[in-house]
Image (cartoon, rainbow, N blue to C red):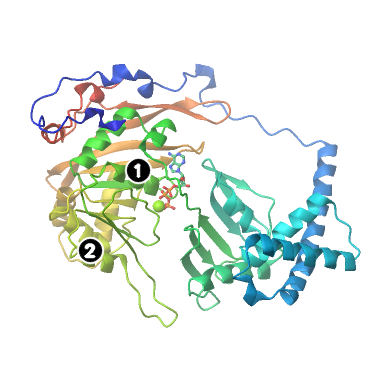
Amino acid sequence: MFSRFKKPEGQQTRPAPTAPVNAASPAAARPAATPPKAMLGARPPAQPARSPADVAAADKEKKRKDRLAELKVDLHKRLLDNLNLAALEHASEANLKQEIASISAEALDEMSVALNKDDRATLNQELYDEVMGLGPLEPLLKDETVNDILVNGPNRIFVERAGKLELTDITFKNERHLLRIIDKIVSAVGRRVDESNPYCDARLADGSRFNVMVPPVAVDGSLVSIRKFKKEKLGIPDLVRFGAFTEEMGAYLQAAVSTRLNVIVSGGTGSGKTTTLNALSSFIDNKERVLTIEDTAELQLQQVHVGRMESRPANVEGKGAVTQRDCLRNALRMRPDRIIVGETRGEEVIDMLQAMNTGHDGSMTTIHANSARDGISRLENMVAMAGIEMPLKAVRAQIASAVNLIVQASRLQDGSRRMISVTEITGMEGEVISMQEVFRYERLGVEPNGKIIGRFNATGVRSHYSERFRQWGYDLPASIYEPII
Ligand SMILES: Nc1ncnc2c1ncn2[C@@H]1O[C@H](COP(=O)(O)OP(=O)(O)OP(=O)(O)O)[C@@H](O)[C@H]1O
Ligand SMILES: [Mg+2]
């Protein structure tokens, strides 16, 4: 879809006719809806009070859940006594489920507990999850609509769906139960968490990113955060469809990545930085050798020639750490065409800037920052914290010549994720890095249901790299830089 601005081979230097991009899809840059003026800034309506019948039903449901939870603990103990744990590894899922069902049926009979068919099925599934999986977290891990799982102690489990946090009715039995599941996760990757070593990063078997902090550092019970791994990564067309940016911006980004500009994706936590980086990487030519470096491998590049690296923390004896910087230094000896660092957050910034400046142009990374200007300050700070004694002006000059483009990702209050700004670095003016914004998201108001109304717009500034784009065969029509008034 985005190759329509790319000229066929052999015609790279001829100026191309200006295709009426905006005319082709004017809707892309128009506001989604124009709100009546009175609605702007209106607050969402308050939640209606719950009726007594609702309260009674909720109470009944809670009692049912508590009862099932109690039973589960008893049955789980029995299962651990009765199941041959060594044989579990080789048992098929169906066999194991059958085995669990029969042991639990026997136990329920012994306890003279009668359960209806649904409750029995729920109980057996939960027991299976308990024995083989991550207990109460298992249904959330399987739920495709959940992006993040956030545990604040045993009784509060939140999930993030469509950019919004929701409290679930799932709980752990108690802190010990939660700790047992945590232990299961971290021991599977050869790590340990306890009072003396209270936090840890790990990757779940399905690729999800996992972080934990246990008491007493976590005051009200263990804190767990899981960023679910998505097999189907969002591509450029998906992001355009979801309104993360427009087709015109997509065409511009294609030109930027294909012509090997160095790109930084900046944004807050969970704003879609990694997703954007992954999508942008789809514009990299299949012939190029790409090396990726991450703390937790999340990127999924589609190219043929990709080498993936993952840093490693020290082991229990404090040995064997391999940092992102180690990986990056080594990567430079591995003949990369491009280097992609999942997130630059420390001393590796020095090597990243050097790589961008010395022949590995087209490299990309993400940083945690709230605006392009803020992103530059973050880079300066990281250089300073890496212990490099360089005058600020020299650091800035290094950054200005290394970084070409900063795209700012943001999660808005209504949960939508948008590319709120695309900013080019144009050089230095005295001591200051000069930059120009090319596209931005303009917020126009808010609907009564809290949905934000806005539109993407060009700022009217023509790209600093237009000539480069043209020479490489990406003749973006001038109209894409024209703002809608
Ligand atoms: N434009 C989008 N529309 C819908 N969902 C999105 C969009 N961008 C990202 N997501 C989803 O939001 C979640 C967070 O995205 P992502 O991991 O890219 O964020 P991040 O900024 O890298 O987070 P972190 O700061 O934790 O590294 C993911 O589950 C992803 O699938
Ligand atoms: Mg990320």
Which residue is most to the right? 112
Closer-to-camera residue (169/305):
305
Q: Is residue 35 left or right of residue 70?
A: left
Q: Is residue 309 left or right of residue 317?
A: left
Element at label 2:
helix
Q: Is residue 125 visible?
A: yes
Q: Residue at x 51, y 42 (%)?
A: 163
Q: Which residue is mark 2?
A: 331
**Residue type at the position of mark 2:** Ala
- 439, above or below 175, in the image: above
**Coordinates of residue 161 in the picture (x, y in percent):** 55, 43
**Coordinates of residue 223 in the picture (x, y in percent):** 57, 62
Which residue is most to the bottom? 317
Q: Which residue is mark 1?
A: 279
Q: Residue at x 17, y 46 (%)?
A: 432
- 290, above or below 405, in the image: below
- 414, above or below 89, in the image: above
